[in-house]
Image (cartoon, rainbow, N blue to C red):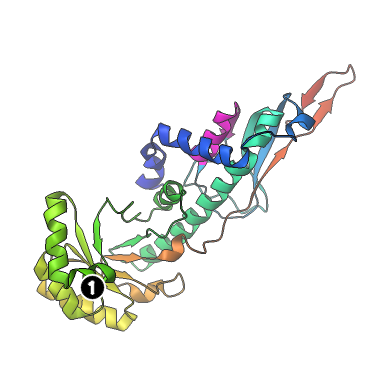
């Protein structure tokens, strides 16, 4: 198991888990829950079932946080980062608590787990491709995340063992084409950005040609993104830039998919970022099934734990 899988959950502040769980619950239940009258508050047990074999589990801290908010407990059979087995249906966790409260948390918790696990699964697949080709660089995500859900999606990238890239606009300076056009030149844009971010932040510049990359490097950029290059063009440009600026980091982005990722691997490319890690990523199919009570001859009722 990689270091990412061991430590990813510890990177999420407890207050962030609580805040998100409360927001999701408030969105789904802004006032009355009429269906809660039907089930009441008797203690029940529900089984979390994964129905997508060979998936990577991710999102358990968020899932647990939702149920903690409604007074339920969760016992996990797998940890985040684990591959759920080959069976058509796999028991992944057991949730216990008052029936109406358990059902309040069901949909927000499942939505989070399905999305996060889907992203982690795709990330693990991409990382496996890079490892198989013995590529030295980092596969990375982007800021193309779901509004309000970025923390979960970036967390899933960590679990899937790819780089999250920058978390937000404050995390690293990235000067894209619109910044360059508005500033007048790459050199002026880098100069202005450096005056604000100082030594503590890297500056990356999106470039559409080798010459733009050279201008960015000479202006003091730490990273050059070669945007929307065809693979062969990318290899030539990256080699030329590394020859002139050995310490420069080269990122490839734009048009990269799981199907063509291997074509972008190069000894001169340090980072390959893919928007499809979060955009259009399949989800993992989970369901939560409340167990029926077991009736005993003397009238005592237990929950089915078989």
Quadrant housing residue 93: top right
Residue 207: x, y in percent? Answer: 24, 74
Q: For the view shown, which residue lies furthest in the right direction?
A: 297
Magenta highlight range:
60-75
Between 106 and 179, the residue placed more toward the observer is 179
| Number of marks in the rendered image | 1
Q: Residue at x 16, y 59 (%)?
A: 193
Between 253 and 86, the residue placed more toward the observer is 253
Depicted 289 relative to depicted 195: above or below: above
Q: Quadrant of the C terminus?
A: top right
Residue 228: x, y in percent? Answer: 34, 77
Q: Secondary structure at mark 1?
A: helix
Side of 185 where 129 appears, left or right: right
| Residue for badge 1 | 181
Q: For residue 63: magenta?
A: yes
Q: For the view shown, which residue lies furthest in the top direction?
A: 298
Residue 163: x, y in percent? Answer: 34, 55
Visible residue check, residue 300: yes
Side of 195 where 90 appears, left or right: right
Visible residue check, residue 268: no
Principal secondary structure, stretch drawn in magenta: helix
Q: Residue at x 66, y 33 (%)?
A: 102
Residue 208: x, y in percent? Answer: 26, 78
Between 124 and 272, the residue placed more toward the observer is 272
Depicted 88 relative to depicted 133: above or below: above
Q: Residue at x 89, y 16 (%)?
A: 298
Q: Residues within 10 Å of mark 1 (few under 14, many from 20)?
A: few
Q: For residue 251: magenta?
A: no
């Amino acid at each position: 198991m990689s270091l990412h899988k061991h430590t990813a959950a510890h990177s999420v502040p407890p207050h962030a888990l609580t805040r998100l769980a409360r927001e999701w619950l408030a969105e789904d239940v802004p006032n009355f829950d009429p269906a809660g009258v039907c089930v009441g508050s008797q203690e029940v047990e529900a089984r979390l079932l994964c129905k997508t074999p060979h998936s990577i589990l991710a999102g358990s801290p968020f899932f647990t946080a939702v149920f903690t908010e409604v007074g339920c407990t969760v016992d996990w059979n797998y940890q985040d980062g684990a591959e759920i087995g080959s069976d058509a249906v796999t028991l992944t966790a057991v949730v216990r608590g008052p029936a109406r409260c358990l059902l309040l948390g069901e949909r927000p918790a499942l939505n989070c787990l399905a999305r996060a696990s889907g992203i982690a699964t795709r990330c693990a697949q991409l990382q496996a491709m890079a490892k198989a080709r013995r590529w030295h660089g980092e596969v990375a995500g982007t800021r193309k995340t779901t509004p309000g859900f970025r923390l979960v999606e970036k967390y899933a990238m960590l679990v899937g063992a790819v780089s999250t890239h920058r978390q937000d606009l404050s995390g690293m300076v990235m000067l894209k084409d619109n910044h360059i056009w508005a500033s007048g030149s790459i050199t002026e844009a880098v100069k202005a950005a450096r005056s604000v971010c100082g030594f503590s932040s890297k500056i990356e510049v999106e470039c559409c040609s080798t010459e733009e990359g050279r201008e960015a490097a000479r202006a003091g950029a730490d990273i050059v993104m070669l945007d929307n290059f065809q693979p062969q063009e990318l290899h030539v440009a990256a080699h030329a830039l590394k020859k002139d600026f050995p310490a420069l980091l080269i990122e490839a982005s734009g048009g990269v998919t799981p199907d063509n990722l291997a074509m972008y691997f190069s000894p001169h490319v340090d980072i390959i970022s893919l928007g499809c890690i979060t955009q259009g990523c399949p989800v993992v199919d989970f369901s939560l099934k409340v167990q029926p009570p077991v009736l005993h001859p003397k009238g005592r009722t237990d929950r089915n734990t078989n």
